[in-house]
Image (cartoon, grey):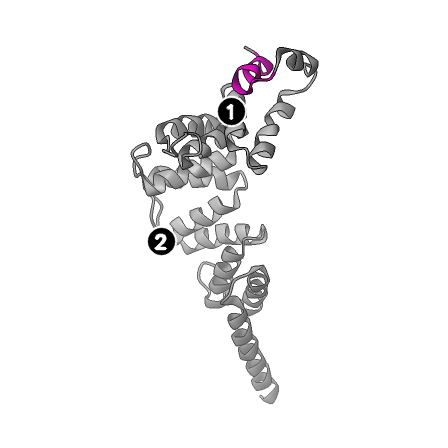
Amino acid sequence: MNLCLRLVTAIGLSLGACAAQSQASAEEFCAQGPVLYGAGEPKLAFRIFMACAIDGDSSSQYSAAMMMRSGESTEDGTPNLFGARVFLEQSASQGYAQAIYALGKEYDVGSPAFPHDLVRATEMFRKAALLGHVDAQVDLATQYLLGRGGVPQDDEAAAHWYERAARAGHWGAQYLIASMYENGNGVGRDEQVALQWYERAGQGGDEVAPLKVEQLRLRLAARARQAWAD
């Protein structure tokens, strides 16, 4: 059954409309799911997600899984964790970074459908991080910082992944890498670089970063005055 016919079954699209839209791509059909969800039509959106998920669309597989996970896929709001796992794994197997990361989070926490498995969680974080998923980069960095999930405690590896996430605009990672530069953990101590990262973290919304900026500026100014006096 092609996607157009799946939509006839899923959302009641008429055969005439299906024929009229026969030139439309699968991507155009599937793109309506997020639009409908954003417009407050979750039931209709879920039907489209399911039709497209069954047709193999990785983004729709992820969206269907998340609605199953939250209970939005059922009339009574009961989560369908095992259904969510099926579609998350299908989406992740196609390299969809958000699904890979979501699997990692599920294994990190554990549930009836997802056994608690920190090593597997780290594997998922790494796969998603390598695909550029910023939150996965932060979580992978934290695994190294704490030495958990099957990886050794490694400040250098933690700093590497925090800095990658920081460069992508994650203000939490910006604060953490600033602290690492300030104290020389995993990177060479560099208070000027630390100051730059604290400033960016503050601009992004971190509430503590502005205080760190002020403290570091005062410290650097005092050090400059002392050097001038000497």
Q: Is residue 58 visible?
A: no
Q: Residue at x 54, y 15 (%)?
A: 6
Quarter of the figure that contains the C terminus? bottom right
Q: Residues within 10 Å of mark 1 (few under 14, many from 20)?
A: some
Residues rendered magenta in the picture: 2-13
Q: Residues within 10 Å of mark 2 (few under 14, many from 20)?
A: some
Q: Secondary structure at mark 1?
A: helix
Residue 45 painted magenta = no
Residue at the spot of label 1: 47
Q: Secondary structure at mark 2?
A: helix
Quarter of the figure that contains the N terminus? top right
Res. 118 image quadrant: top left
Q: Nearer the viewer, residue 150 or 125?
A: 125
Q: Are marks 2 and 1 in contact (CB under 8 Å)?
A: no
How far apart, in angstroms, are the residues tagged by discs 2 and 1?
A: 42 Å
Q: Which residue type does callout 2 highlight?
A: Leu
Q: Residue at x 56, y 83 (%)?
A: 222
